[in-house]
């Protein structure tokens, strides 16, 4: 049995690999969740800004900005600090602080941060940088002061100070941050958010056992809060405990059926497990709470196509297309083209693909247009489109040649397909993909000499190429009487990929040709178990028939024909023996 190289299988480009499923990550984002309405801020600034801006102050502002643009950070720092002190300006102080921090000048950064906090004592960004500065200097007392200030300010603003702490400490190095979190947890022992933040820091330090204990405390104190459950999943995943991670996520879904983050995470897990229908259900649940979430809509649209939920797919991609704020027009038009193509509406599919004007799917859309134009009975126009695509996307020229040739092969025009391969190999004589693909076509056309020439050309460059060893062996076993030579090639492929259904089928077939029928059945049965394929069914049925198991052979053929009613190979085999 032949096997096409994966990149060139002639099929729709719709695959879930286009939507890679990222790992679940604990939420430590800059937008900490709202806990309560905002209250009066806890700190008062004593700095008074000047009544007017004099020339010297204006000069320092301008000189500071110009020095930044020129890359003269020391001059920029001095001018910004002078402006900050003269105007009591927290913005200038913040710029000076960040500039010194990026240059790793601890002393200058500390001076600027001190001014920034003096002029704007309720700035969470200033307090976070002061926290990191204290930890970098091993000043635990200073770090504690800033951490408590962050908690107070965040509480007044209705934000989660512990989440902000966790986010800030993610970039801190050393064990001092763990000591700080331990102190804070002792101070706020009944606060679930404190234990969660400690769990985040422990996870960052890869102390997973302690992190799980901290998560358990957060769960116990706030059983209705979803974030600790997701962090538990992440910790198990980081430890390589996939089963525990999956079970933790299932528990979270059961306990929090309305939590969108958990529904989304579980939907992604089901996608990885290829349980697409169930995954779609959970992503739709998440979308109820986040109806304009761009990534959720994208995943839902792809899954709707995968599961042939045409109505949902159309609604989702049209929403992505029609909302300019989502900036997904090109991708939406592409998948709307996929939607029509999957339903057999080829002319409308082409029209949709034509709307893809840019982005990562532009060339794919042009390729689909070229393919569908050929299928719509316009071969010359199709060939022109393929040629244009090779000119505009030369890095994909080889793949374009193969796709074009496979189109004409599918259209029952093998001579034209062969001419395309000949042209391609003349342009790229050392390309092994082209040689392999032409070899497969030549074998299908019964041109064993050309097939053998191409397969051996590939093996000269890639002696251990599994697919080519198998293809050459199968061609010799199926179309010549050189069975021992065929067996040697297939055996070499089998040693490298003993679980490949294509190679198992080839091994079974060559053993049958060698007269080793009982051994043949073992390989063919295994191949049929692994892959529903009409060629495997025809081979298995034939060997069963000649070994006397005619009823089983009929059963295998009947099932194969039911699943693949247009298989020429299967029909011919049945007619030969019945």
Image: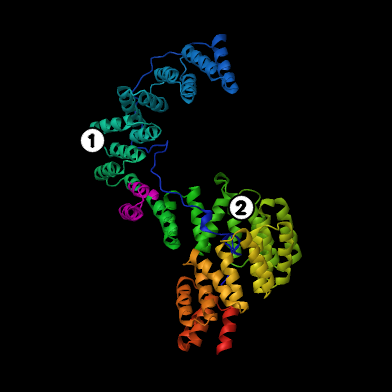
Q: Toward the viewer: 518 or 300? A: 518
Asked if residue 280 is positioned above or below residue 79 in the image, the reply reads: below
Alpha carbons under labels 2 and 1: distance apart: 52 Å
Region rendered in magenta: 232-261
Would you call the spot at circle 2 few (<14 residues within 10 Å), some (14-19), or many (20 or more)? some
Quadrant of res 469: bottom right
Q: Which mark is residue 205?
A: none
**Residue 129: percent from left, percent from top:** 41, 26
Query: Which type of secondary structure does the marked residue at label 1 adopt?
Result: loop
User: Which residue matches tag 2?
Assistant: 361
Q: Would you say the magenta stretch is mainly helix, strand or loop?
A: helix
User: Which residue matches tag 1?
Assistant: 189
Instruction: Give the residue displayed 52% in from the left and 69% down from the top.
Output: 491
Would you call the spot at circle 1 few (<14 residues within 10 Å), some (14-19), or many (20 or more)? some
Is residue 242 in the magenta section? yes
Q: Toward the viewer: 423 or 169? A: 423
């Amino acid at each position: 049995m032949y096997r096409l190289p994966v990149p060139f299988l002639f099929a729709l480009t719709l695959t879930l690999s286009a939507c890679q499923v990222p790992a679940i990550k604990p939420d430590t984002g800059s937008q900490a969740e709202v806990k309560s309405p905002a209250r009066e801020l806890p700190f008062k600034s004593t700095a008074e800004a000047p009544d007017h801006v004099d020339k010297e102050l204006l000069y320092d502002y301008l000189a500071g900005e110009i020095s930044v643009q020129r890359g003269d950070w020391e001059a920029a720092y001095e001018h910004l600090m002078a402006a900050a002190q003269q105007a009591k300006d927290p913005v200038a102080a913040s710029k000076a602080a960040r500039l010194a921090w990026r240059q790793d000048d601890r002393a200058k950064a500390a001076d600027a941060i001190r001014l920034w906090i003096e002029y704007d004592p309720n700035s969470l960004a200033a307090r976070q940088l002061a926290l990191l500065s204290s930890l970098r200097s091993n000043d635990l007392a200073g770090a504690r002061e800033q951490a408590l200030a962050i908690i107070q300010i965040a509480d007044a603003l209705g934000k989660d100070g512990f989440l902000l702490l966790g986010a800030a400490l993610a970039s801190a190095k050393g064990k001092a941050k763990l000591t700080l979190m331990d102190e804070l947890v002792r101070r706020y022992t009944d606060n679930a958010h404190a234990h969660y933040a400690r769990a985040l820091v422990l996870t960052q330090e890869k102390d997973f056992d302690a992190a799980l204990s901290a998560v358990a405390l957060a769960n116990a104190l706030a059983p209705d809060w979803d974030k600790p459950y997701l962090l538990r999943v992440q910790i198990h995943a980081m430890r390589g405990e996939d089963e525990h991670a999956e079970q933790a996520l299932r528990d979270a879904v059961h306990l929090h059926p309305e939590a969108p983050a958990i529904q989304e995470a579980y939907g992604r897990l089901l996608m990885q497990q290829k349980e697409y229908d169930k995954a779609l259900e959970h992503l739709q649940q998440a979308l109820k709470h986040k109806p304009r979430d761009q990534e959720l809509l994208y995943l839902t649209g792809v899954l709707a196509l995968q599961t042939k939920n045409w109505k949902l797919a159309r609604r989702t991609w049209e929403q992505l297309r029609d909302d300019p704020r989502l900036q997904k027009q090109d991708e939406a038009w592409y998948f709307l083209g996929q939607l029509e193509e999957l339903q057999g509406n080829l002319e409308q599919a082409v029209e949709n693909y034509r709307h893809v004007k840019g982005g990562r799917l532009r060339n794919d859309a042009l390729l689909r247009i070229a393919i569908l134009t050929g299928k719509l009975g316009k071969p010359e126009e199709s060939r022109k489109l393929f040629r244009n695509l090779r000119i505009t996307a030369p890095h994909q020229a080889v793949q374009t040649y193969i796709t074009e040739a496979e189109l004409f092969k599918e259209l029952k025009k093998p001579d034209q397909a062969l001419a395309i391969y000949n042209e391609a190999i003349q342009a790229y004589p050392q390309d092994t993909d082209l040689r392999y693909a032409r070899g497969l076509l030549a074998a299908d056309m019964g041109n064993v000499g050309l097939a053998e020439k191409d397969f051996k050309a590939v093996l000269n460059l890639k002696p251990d190429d599994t697919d080519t060893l198998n293809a050459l062996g199968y061609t010799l076993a199926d179309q010549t009487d050189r069975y021992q030579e065929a067996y040697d090639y297939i055996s070499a492929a089998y040693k490298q990929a003993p679980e490949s259904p294509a190679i198992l089928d080839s091994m079974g077939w060559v053993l049958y040709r060698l007269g080793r029928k009982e051994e043949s059945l073992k390989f063919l049965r295994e191949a049929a178990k692994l892959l529903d394929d009409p060629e495997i069914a025809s081979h298995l049925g034939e060997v069963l028939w000649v070994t006397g198991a005619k009823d089983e052979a009929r059963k295998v053929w009947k099932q194969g024909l039911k699943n693949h009613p247009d298989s020429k190979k299967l029909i011919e085999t049945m007619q030969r023996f019945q």
